[in-house]
Image (cartoon, grey):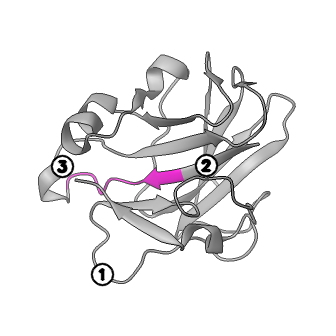
Amino acid sequence: TLSFCSAYKSMFGSEPTYTNRNNEFFELSNLGESSVDLTNFVIRRTKLGGDTYEARFTSLVLNQGDSIVISPDAESLRQDSGVDATSANSVMNSSVFLTNSGAALQLIAPDGSIRDTVVYGNADPVIEGWNGAAMSEPNGSSFGLIYVRGDGCSNIPDSNTSADWTIRWSRIG
């Protein structure tokens, strides 16, 4: 079972600590019982209004129990937060940028099946693989906010709802 387990959208240029950095990321976990070859899997981002963008994995095997943090700017993310990240361009044909206003992210298998979906911000939550309202930010500042699924990506049920993403929050930096 592959699952999104955390995501961070950088408010590009608006966070004083991270100006001119692209520290956003998403994290995938393999909660299944065997390794998964992600080659030709796709990450699809759908913005409010329906505009989509897709990036395809070119080479990545995720072993049982492993997770990977994927960022357009892995080096800046490492420097600013200590997060061990992989550059999107080293495992995908291009980077997926998380829009500040919200979007849906879908993990799509080569056969076209939706393996996981997450919807945040002002994105339209009516999308295959998701039920109910989009994830929302907790009260207070959203600067440095990391969305965390469950208690930190451990093997918990995935209901494909925002409730999966409200158990715990984290901050970068």
**In the figure, is residue 40 to the left or right of 14?**
right
The residue under label 3 is which amino acid type? Tyr
Per the picture, the main secondary structure of the magenta-coloured stretch is: loop
Three-letter amino acid code of the residue under disc 1: Gly
> Residue 72 location, x and y as percent?
39, 33
Q: Residue at x 65, y 77 (%)?
A: 133
Which residue occupies 24% across, 45% down? 81
| Numbered disc 3: secondary structure | helix
Q: Residues within 10 Å of mark 2 (few under 14, many from 20)?
A: many
32 or 72, which lies in front? 32
Give the Cα distance between marks 2 and 3. 24 Å
What secondary structure is found at the residue carrying circle 2? strand
Residue 18's mark? Answer: 3
Could you tell me which residue is drawn at 80 percent across and 28 percent down?
110
Q: Nearer the viewer, residue 33 or 129?
A: 33
Magenta stretch: give its range.
6-13
